[in-house]
Image (spheres, coloured by chain):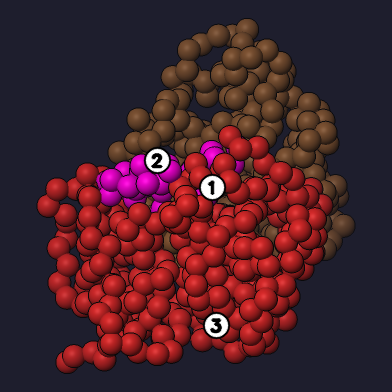
Chain colours: A red, B brown
C-alpha cells in the first residue's frame, strides 16, 4: 500500500515525506523538486565503513544510521535522503525522531551547525535560548511567543554563516513541544496537536507567529538552572562562550566527527563566539518561574537596544 | 576502563562518601569544593544519555529509556578515565529486554551504602519536604522512583528505586558484580576503618595520613558550612538544606510507633541482616509501643 506524500518546509529545505511529521505541512505545494526526500523501506542494520559508532548510531562521511529500539531504523545520506524502516513505531513515533535527532544529522551533513536551543525573532535579529534537555528552552520560547515575538526554532536551532561570515539562524518549523506543567504555568490557550508520543505528558503546540526565513543571530542566552532563588543575567566571556557553544550546547555533537563535519562546526562556533554577545542566565531549579525569566530576558534585550517585539506580528501563538 | 558504582538508596551517606573520596584524591591543599565532587551521577543525567546514545530522552518513555541504559553504562565505562566513580541511586535491575542495568563488562565493583531505614525516612522527608507518612509509603512501594515527574521534565532520567529493602537486595543478592557493603552507622562510628576499607576495595593507593585529612575536610560541619556559604548543586530545590543532621538514631524522637511498625513490617528481614531490627522492636515493645499510634 503506497502512502500519501506530505510536503513540509523546515530549516530552509523542501521536505517530502510519506510519514507525517509533527508539524503543519507547507501551505503551498510548489512544483520544485524536494531538497530532502524521505522514503519508507528496508534500512541496513549497519554502515559498510563507519568512522564512528556509539550507542544507537553510526556515522561516516555522508552517511548516518540511527536505530531506535521498538520504533524505527533511519539511514540519512548526503544531506538529501532519509530511509526509514519501521520497527514497531507508529507514524507519530517515527515522526518525532525524524524531526529531532535524524534531522539534526541531516543538517550536519549539510554543514549546518545544530545548537541545542530555541530561537525567536526580535527587532534587531535572532535570539537563541541555549539549554540542555530540561533547562527550559521550550517554555521560555513559548513565553516569548506569548509576548509577541515570532518563533524561529524549538529544541534544535540550525545556524549557518552567510556570505559575509555572519552567523544566521535558520527557520526550523512552526511547532513548540511543551510539557503539561509548562502549558499550565503559561496559560497556553491555543489548541495542541496532541501528545508528542503516547504515554508522555508533552504536547505539540503549533505556533502561528512564526518567522519562515533566516535571520542574523544577535544574541544568545545560556539557560543554567542553579542553586538559589534569583534570576541573574550576566555576560559570558568569549573563551567561555566558545567552550560552551562548541560542547555543551551543540546538539548531537558526537555525530560530527564521523560525518567529517568538525571543521565546519569549528568555523561557525568561532564566528558565534566572536560576533554574538552571549549571556549566562542563572535560574532557580524549582519553581521555574517562566514569566519572571521572560521578564529578565526582555529587560536584557531592551538594555541592548533590541526592540522587544518583532515587526512581523501575526496571529497570537 | 570500568566503573566503581557508588550505589545507595537516597539519603544513605553517598554524598559524604564522595566528599571523602574527592578529598582523598584532591591534589591541591585545603578542602575540595562540595560543588565539584567526584562520582557525580553521570549515568542518571539526561544530557549525558542524549549525547552519548544520540537519542532524545525527553521524547522517550521511562521503559524505552531504561532499555537503553545498559548500553549507556558501557559507553560511560569506555569513556571515563580511572579512577571512575559514579554515584547511582537506581536499584540493580534487569532492563526491559533482559539485559542487566549495570553490566558486568562496565563494572569494576560496587560500593553499597546502607543506612537504617528509620533514619532514612526522617532524612528523606526533610529532603523532599514531604510528610513522613508519605515517605514511609514511598519506601514501601515497589514502583517508587526518584525524578518521576510525569507532567514536566527535570535534568535527570527517571530513577527506579523499588522498596527500601528491594533496593538493598537488588544490589546485594545479584551475584554477578563484586560488592563491598558499608553501613552509614559504621562510617559515623569509625570513619577511618569504614572509608579505609572502601579506599582499599577501590584499589586506590593507600595513604593513611591522607585519609585522615580527607575525613577531616569532609567532616559534617565543614560540608554544612560550605553549603551555607556557596549552596549545593545537588540539593532538592525545595529543601532548606542538604546536609541536615548527619547523625544516627534521630528516628527515636521523629517517628511515631505506627510509622516504625510500618517500616519494620515491610523490611524486617533486611533490617535484621544489618542489625537495625532489634532496636526497632525494643522501641515498639517499650515506651514507644505503649504510647500507641
- For the residue pair B274 and A257, the one nearer the viewer reads as A257
Quadrant where the N terminus of chain A is found in the figure: bottom left
- For the residue pair B269 and A58, the one nearer the viewer reads as A58
What is the crowding at mark 2: few (fewer than 14 residues within 10 Å), some, or many (at least 20)? many
What is the crowding at mark 3: few (fewer than 14 residues within 10 Å), some, or many (at least 20)? many
Residue at 78% across, 26% down: B222
Quadrant of residue B225 within the rendered picture: top right
Identify the secondary structure beneath mark 3. strand
Residue on which the image places disc 3: A206
- The secondary structure that dominates the magenta segment is helix
Quadrant where the C terminus of chain A is found in the figure: bottom right
A147 left or right of B3 in image:
right
Residue at 28% across, 82% down: A32
Quadrant of residue A45 within the rendered picture: bottom left
Q: Position of residue B235 (x, y in %)?
A: 71, 46
Q: Position of residue A238 (x, y in %)?
A: 61, 38
Query: Share a chain, discs 1 and 3?
Result: yes
> A90 above or below B226?
below
Identify the secondary structure beneath mark 1. helix
Residue at 47% across, 52% down: A164
Which chain letter goes with mark 3?
A: A
* Mark earlier in primary sequence (1, 3): 3
Identify the secondary structure beneath mark 2. helix
Q: Position of residue B38 (x, y in %)?
A: 56, 31
Q: Look at the image and give the residue range highlighted in magenta.
A: A240-267
Q: Can you tell which mark lies on residue B265? A: none
Amino acid at each position: 500500500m503506497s502512502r500519501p506524500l506530505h510536503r513540509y518546509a523546515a530549516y530552509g529545505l523542501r521536505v517530502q515525506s510519506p510519514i507525517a511529521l509533527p508539524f503543519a505541512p507547507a501551505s503551498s505545494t510548489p512544483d520544485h523538486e524536494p531538497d530532502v526526500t524521505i522514503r519508507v523501506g528496508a534500512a541496513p542494520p549497519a554502515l559498510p565503513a563507519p568512522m564512528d559508532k556509539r550507542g544507537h548510531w553510526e556515522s561516516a562521511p555522508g552517511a548516518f544510521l540511527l536505530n531506535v529500539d521498538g520504533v524505527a531504523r533511519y539511514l540519512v545520506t548526503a544531506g538529501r535522503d532519509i530511509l526509514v524502516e519501521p520497527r514497531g513505531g507508529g507514524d507519530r513515533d517515527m515522526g518525532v525522531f525524524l524531526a529531532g535527532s535524524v534531522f539534526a544529522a541531516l543538517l550536519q551533513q549539510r554543514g549546518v551547525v545544530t545548537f541545542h536551543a530555541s530561537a525567536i525573532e526580535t527587532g534587531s535579529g535572532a535570539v537563541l535560548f541555549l539549554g540542555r534537555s530540561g533547562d527550559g528552552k521550550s517554555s521560555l520560547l513559548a513565553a516569548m511567543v506569548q509576548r509577541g515575538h515570532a518563533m524561529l526554532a524549538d529544541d534544535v536551532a540550525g545556524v549557518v554563516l552567510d556570505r559575509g561570515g555572519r552567523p544566521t539562524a535558520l527557520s526550523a518549523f512552526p511547532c513548540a513541544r511543551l510539557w503539561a506543567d509548562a502549558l499550565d504555568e503559561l496559560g497556553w490557550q491555543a489548541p495542541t496537536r496532541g501528545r508528542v508520543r503516547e504515554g508522555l505528558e508533552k504536547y505539540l503546540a503549533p505556533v502561528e507567529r512564526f518567522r519562515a526565513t533566516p535571520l542574523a543571530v544577535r544574541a544568545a542566552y545560556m539557560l543554567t538552572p542553579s542553586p538559589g532563588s534569583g534570576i541573574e543575567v550576566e555576560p559570558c566571556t568569549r573563551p567561555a562562550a566558545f567552550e560552551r557553544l562548541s560542547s555543551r550546547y551543540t546538539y548531537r555533537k558526537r555525530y560530527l566527527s564521523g560525518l567529517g563535519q568538525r571543521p565546519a562546526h569549528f568555523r561557525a562556533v568561532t564566528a558565534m563566539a566572536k560576533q554574538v554577545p552571549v549571556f549566562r542566565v542563572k535560574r532557580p531549579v524549582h519553581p521555574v518561574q517562566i514569566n519572571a525569566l521572560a521578564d529578565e530576558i526582555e529587560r536584557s534585550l531592551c538594555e541592548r537596544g533590541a526592540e522587544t517585539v518583532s515587526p512581523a506580528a501575526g496571529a497570537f501563538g | 576502563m570500568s566503573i566503581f558504582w557508588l550505589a545507595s538508596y537516597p539519603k544513605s551517606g553517598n554524598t559524604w562518601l564522595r566528599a571523602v573520596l574527592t578529598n582523598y584524591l584532591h591534589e591541591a591543599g585545603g578542602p575540595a569544593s562540595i560543588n565539584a565532587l567526584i562520582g557525580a551521577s553521570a549515568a542518571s543525567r539526561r544530557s549525558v544519555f542524549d549525547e552519548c546514545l544520540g537519542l532524545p530522552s525527553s521524547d522517550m518513555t521511562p521503559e524505552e529509556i531504561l532499555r537503553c541504559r545498559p548500553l549507556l553504562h558501557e559507553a560511560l565505562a569506555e569513556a571515563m578515565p580511572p579512577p571512575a566513580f559514579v554515584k547511582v541511586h537506581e536499584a540493580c535491575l534487569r532492563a526491559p529486554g533482559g539485559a542487566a542495568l549495570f553490566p558486568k563488562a562496565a563494572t569494576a565493583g560496587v560500593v553499597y551504602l546502607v543506612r537504617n531505614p528509620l533514619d532514612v525516612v526522617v532524612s528523606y522527608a526533610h529532603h523532599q519536604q514531604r510528610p513522613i507518612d508519605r515517605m514511609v509509603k514511598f519506601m514501601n512501594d515497589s514502583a517508587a522512583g526518584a525524578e518521576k515527574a510525569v507532567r514536566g521534565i527535570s535534568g535527570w532520567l527517571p530513577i527506579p528505586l523499588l522498596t527500601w529493602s528491594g533496593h538493598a537486595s537488588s544490589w546485594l543478592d545479584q551475584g554477578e558484580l563484586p560488592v563491598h557493603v558499608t553501613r552509614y552507622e559504621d562510617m559515623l562510628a569509625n570513619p577511618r576503618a569504614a572509608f579505609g576499607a572502601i579506599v582499599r576495595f577501590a584499589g586506590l593507593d593507600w595513604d593513611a595520613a591522607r585519609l585522615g585529612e580527607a575525613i577531616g575536610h569532609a567532616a559534617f560541619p565543614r560540608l554544612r558550612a560550605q553549603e551555607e556559604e556557596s549552596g549545593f548543586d545537588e540539593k532538592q530545590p525545595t529543601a532548606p538544606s542538604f546536609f541536615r543532621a548527619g547523625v544516627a538514631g534521630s528516628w527515636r524522637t521523629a517517628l511515631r510507633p505506627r510509622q516504625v511498625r510500618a517500616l519494620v513490617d515491610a523490611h524486617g528481614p533486611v533490617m535484621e541482616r544489618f542489625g537495625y531490627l532489634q532496636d526497632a522492636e525494643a522501641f515498639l515493645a517499650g515506651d514507644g509501643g505503649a504510647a500507641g499510634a
